[in-house]
Image: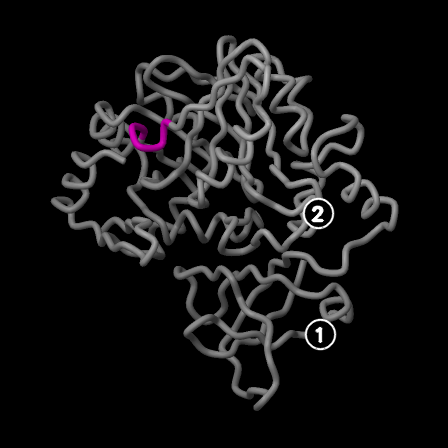
Amino acid sequence: MSSDLLDLLKQQGADISAATDGQMFVNCSGDAEHKICALQESAVVCPLLDLICIRVTGKDRTKFLHNFCTNNVNDLESGQYCEAFFCDVKARILAHGYVLAGKEFHEIHMLPGNENTLLDHLNRYIITEDVTLTSLSAERTMFAVAGPQTQDVLRAVNRMEVFSAPGCRMNGDATVLQTNWNDLPAAFVSVTDESAVETWNELTSVATAAGDSTFHHLRILEGYPIIGTDLTGDHLAPEADRNEVAISYTKGCYLGQEPIARLDAMGHVNRKLYQGWATIADDTKNGEELPTVTSRSMVAEASFPVLLPLPVKLAANSSPVLAKIKDGPTVRVDRLV
């Protein structure tokens, strides 16, 4: 995380706060409704100061990563990426993010969480393999760009190669991953701390400066979980409901593959992470333990998107579900998907 960028954001009037775990939250000045309109009609750029970046080097890195995540790393060509979970032998989630393939190294990009959990887990299995894991999180700054004009925004940064299809490009001081979230073009841009201020200025010259509230609004609509917040080590990878994009059922053996294959054969999980739209509830069920909303949009007001883990049976009847926002009110959640 760039301290220079943090200072600049403060000078620009951004609201910056820190959670008890030290994670930084940034929201740039400006009207929230304007930022959502820009997300839908043009583009926004959000500083993501606590994203995790791990570089993987060594001649055995491709096979090693393939054996310890849920997606097919072996088939990635340089410039391609996949979304994946890293699990223990029982398929319980340890980490989740993107695996990016380059000519000389791979990178793992994740939303904020316990980076050491994944590093300790993977390093435990390096015995004779030529694989080295290096955290770059402390020396990199990341930005999310999203909206219909995402590619036009990326072109404003001269050193970034823009390409038409989803994919990734990695060079010495910048990594760009282009994807789609909730049917909107999106990109994650990782740069060295030394170039963070320059990159921010270039991006915001053509995009609306936003922040965590806008980013997490989009993340919730995409159904993209944060491990440790939406899902924990007690959850199995298929319970995230990202199976089509993050789990390969044809890649062969990997750590956690057997329980995941059994769940696939059963045809369902007993609980999963749902998306829904919530409104403040007029009534509550006194004395009844309610499910907990794990993520909520702070942008919308009367009705807002949320994520919450639920038993499948509870969500199956299409009726609204009463749930509790942590340290907040009871809400009525409907349109569960």
Q: Which residue is mark 1?
A: 319
3 left or right of 72? Answer: left
Dot 1 lies on which element? Answer: loop
Magenta includes 196? Answer: no
Q: What secondary structure predominates along the stretch shown in magenta?
A: helix
Query: Which residue does the image show at 78% across and 33% down from the upper left?
Result: 249
Establish if 155 lies above or below 236: above
Q: Residues within 10 Å of mark 2 (few under 14, many from 20)?
A: many
Side (left or right) of 44 relative to 261: left
Nearer to the camera, 67 or 99: 67
Q: Amino acid at mark 2?
A: Pro
Label 2 and label 1: CA atoms lie apart by: 23 Å
Q: Amino acid at mark 1?
A: Ser
Quadrant in the picture for residue 269: bottom right
Q: Could you say where residue 85 lies in the image, as x and y percent from the top left?
A: 61, 38
Residue at image location 64% in from the left, 30% down from the top: 68
Q: Which sits in the foreground, 326 or 334?
A: 326
Q: Which range is magenta?
A: 136-140
Question: Please, what secondary structure does the residue beneath circle 2 have?
Answer: helix
Packing grade of label 1 (10 A; few <14, some 14-19, many >=20) is: few
Q: Residue 81: image x %, image y %?
A: 57, 24
Residue 140: where, in percent of width, then height? Answer: 32, 29
Residue 82, position as x, y percentages in the image: 60, 28
Q: Residue at x 21, y 25 (%)?
A: 198
Q: Disc 2 designates what residue?
A: 238
Q: Is residue 68 above or below residue 47?
A: above
First reached walking from the N terminus: tag 2 or tag 1: 2
Horizontally, residue 274 falls left or right of residue 262, namely: left
Of discs 2 and 1, which sits in the foreground?
2
